Image: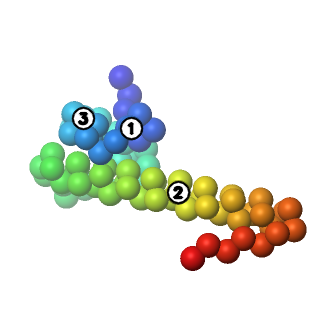
């Protein structure tokens, strides 16, 4: 079974992945893993990638709300 970042529902899912699956996720997302000799190093990079993706999703959700407010003629500012 091919591994994908979208298959992960939380950080704990990363612990159950094989080395091959970790490398596949990194390669599919254009993350260089050369020099990683240990599984924990690959897990660290996938974890960082997962957190970055989740952060971008939350940022995108916030921006879509601002865009919707601007389109309706109302400017919403959150602090």
Residue 19's mark? Answer: none
Foreground of the two, 63 or 27: 63
Any part of residue 4 in sight = no
Q: CA distance from mark 2 to mark 3?
A: 25 Å
Residue 33, position as x, y percentages in the image: 28, 54
Q: Earlier in the sequence, mark 1 or mark 2?
A: 1
Q: Give whichever of 45, 37 is nearer the camera.
A: 45
Is residue 36 positioned above or below 2 on the image?
below
Examine the image and state in which quarter residue 51 appears: bottom left
Indicate whether 33 appears above or below 2. Answer: below
| Mark 3 in CB contact with mark 1 (< 8 angstroms) | no
On the image, numbered disc 3 is attached to which residue? 17
The residue pinned by badge 2 equals 58
User: Where residue 36 sits in the image (x, y, percent)?
Assistant: 18, 54
Residues at marks 3 and 1, CA–CA distance in whole angstroms: 13 Å
Label 1 crowd bin: few (<14), some (14–19), many (20+), radius 10 Å: few
Q: Which residue is mark 1?
A: 9
Q: Earlier in the sequence, mark 2 or mark 3?
A: 3
Q: CA distance from mark 1 to mark 2?
A: 15 Å
Residue 71 percent coordinates (x, y) = 84, 63
**Residue at x 18% of width, y 54% of height:** 41
Give whichever of discs 3 and 1 has the lower sequence position. 1
């Amino acid at each position: 079974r091919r591994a994908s970042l979208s298959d992960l529902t939380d950080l704990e899912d990363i612990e159950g992945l094989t080395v091959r699956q970790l490398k596949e996720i990194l390669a599919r997302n254009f993350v260089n893993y050369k020099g990683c000799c240990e599984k924990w190093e690959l897990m660290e990079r996938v974890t960082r990638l997962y957190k970055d993706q989740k952060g971008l999703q939350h940022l995108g959700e916030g921006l879509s709300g601002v865009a919707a407010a601007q389109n309706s003629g109302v400017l919403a500012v959150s602090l």
